Amino acid sequence: MADPNLPPVGRQPSVRQVSPSVRTPWYGNVVGYRNVDGIQVGGERWTTQQAAAILQRGLDPLTCEAMEVRRQAVNAEIWIPVGNLPAVFAFDCPIIQRMASGKVKVIAPDGQPKIVFANGWGHHPIRRPSQPEDGFSQTRILGAGGSGSRPIFSTTRKAIR
């Protein structure tokens, strides 16, 4: 297994991949960043949402305890060549609470609380580089699966149109 602790490429991609039905806590508004190859690098320590959450909780933005939280990029954010591990994004996140389980509750870049691992990962990182056959599934080929190729059964005596 490969070591996923690669040096971070930046804080977040410049173009966000957002789904309306899924909350993504790892995007925030970074002030003063540089755009390097489509990735936001540098800028102020806290996102605007984190700064608001820090003040709302009564913490001092200059002295509050923080940790670097890392996450791996998905293919929609950065293209990952076959045989490589995903790129890593990293944010400083203010610590709200250290839990008995060893996990840490932080203020994510979107300003909401998020529970992360004590080693700084926001999720279990992928440790196996991608292989050429990872993306292939016979059911994804048009006509070999999916709702369009399933037979329709009716429990009524009416004709199916």
Image (spheres, rainbow, N blue to C red):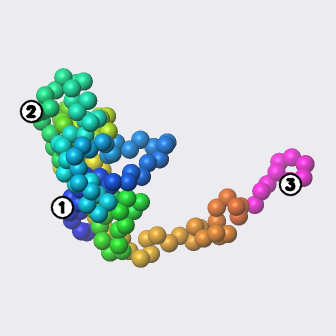
Element under label 3? loop
Q: Nearer the viewer, mark 3 or mark 1?
A: 1
Q: Is residue 69 visible?
A: no
Q: Residue 129 at x, y = what percent?
A: 31, 70
27 above or below 2? above
Residue toward you, 87 or 104: 87
Q: Residue 123 at x, y = what percent?
A: 30, 50
Residue drawn at the location 17% of the way across and 42% of the way down: 45
Q: Which residues are magenta?
A: 151-160
Q: Nearer the viewer, mark 2 or mark 3?
A: 2
Q: Quadrant of the N terminus?
A: bottom left
Residue 25 picture quarter: top left
Q: Which of marks 1 and 3 precedes in the sequence?
A: 1
Q: Is residue 155 rendered magenta in the image?
A: yes
Q: Residue 142 at x, y = what percent?
A: 64, 69
Q: Which of marks 1 and 2 precedes in the sequence?
A: 1
Label 3: which residue?
161
60 above or below 156? above
Residue type at the position of mark 3: Arg
Count the labels in the image. Answer: 3
Taking the image as shown, residue 159 lies to the left or right of residue 57, namely right
Q: Residue 124 at x, y = what percent?
A: 29, 53
116 above or below 17? above
Residue toward you, 132 or 68: 68
Q: Quadrant of the C terminus?
A: bottom right
Mark number for residue 7?
Answer: 1
Q: How would you rate the neighbour count of disc 2 (Cα within 10 Å): few for under 14, some for 14-19, many for 20 or more?
A: few
Label 2: which residue?
63
Q: Are marks 2 and 1 in contact (CB under 8 Å)?
A: no
Element under label 2? loop
Element under label 1? loop
